[in-house]
Amino acid sequence: MRRYICVLILLFAFFSLPTFLAAQDSGGGRGQHESGFSLGQNYPNPFNPETRIPFDLGDDLFVDGRPVVVSLRIYTILQQYVASPTVLDHPLGDGTPLINLEFTQPGHYEAYWDGTNGRGRQVASGMYFMRLDVNGRSVVRKLLVSK
């Protein structure tokens, strides 16, 4: 019975994952995204218990002088929200959740995730997805938790 449930979960994830990724870009390389931002691979990967997530905001995003709105969220393979990492080196201070934060300058930034969910509990080992949203555009990457 347990094996049957695992197979069903994997099949569900396999068939629903394309809809999760459909509107997003793969974020495959470390190079600049055509929209002026990129999401780097977290390090270390796999990790236990914490990781850093690099991302870049290019000059193209700031040509009109307005701030850029950035969010970073972690999801399970079943597309369930897990947590939002905190930003490092932001004017609001380290430890600010990276949800709809405004950035006023281009540059290289980093987020920090301690491997816990919204309730403060350590997440299980496995594959997760991180999604960076910048001004309504998204890029997704995989990350691994290993215990």
Image (cartoon, rainbow, N blue to C red):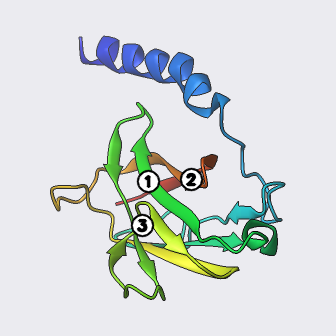
Relative height, residue 38 to residue 59 (above, below): above
Left or right placement of residue 48 versus residue 132 in this view: left
C-alpha separation, residue under disc 3 versus residue under disc 1: 8 Å
1 and 2 marks in contact (CB < 8 Å):
yes
The answer to which of 27 and 137 lies nearer the viewer is 137
Relative height, residue 92 to residue 115 (above, below): below
The answer to which of 25 and 117 lies nearer the viewer is 25
Label 1: element kind:
strand
Say how many tags the image has.
3
Q: Which residue is mark 3?
A: 98
Mark number for residue 133?
2
How far across and how far down the image is residue 21, in percent?
A: 62, 33
Left or right placement of residue 134 versus residue 118 in this view: right
Task: For the C terminus, give its image quadrant.
Answer: bottom left
Residue at the location (61% across, 54% down)? Answer: 135
Q: Earlier in the sequence, mark 3 or mark 1?
A: 1
Q: Quadrant of residue 81?
A: top left
Q: Which residue is mark 1?
A: 73
How far across and how far down the image is residue 108, in percent?
A: 67, 81
Residue at the location (26% across, 61% down)? Answer: 116
How far across and how far down the image is residue 4, in percent?
A: 33, 11
Label 3: element kind:
loop
Eye-nearest disc, 1 or 2: 2
Mark 2 Cα-neighbour bin, 10 Å: few <14, some 14–19, many ≥20: many
Q: Earlier in the sequence, mark 3 or mark 2?
A: 3
Residue at the location (33% across, 80% down)? Answer: 95
| Amino acid type assigned to the residue bearing label 2 in the image | Asp
Residue at the location (39% across, 66% down)? Answer: 85
| Amino acid type assigned to the residue bearing label 3 in the image | Leu
Q: Earlier in the sequence, mark 1 or mark 2?
A: 1
Task: For the N terminus, give its image quadrant.
Answer: top left
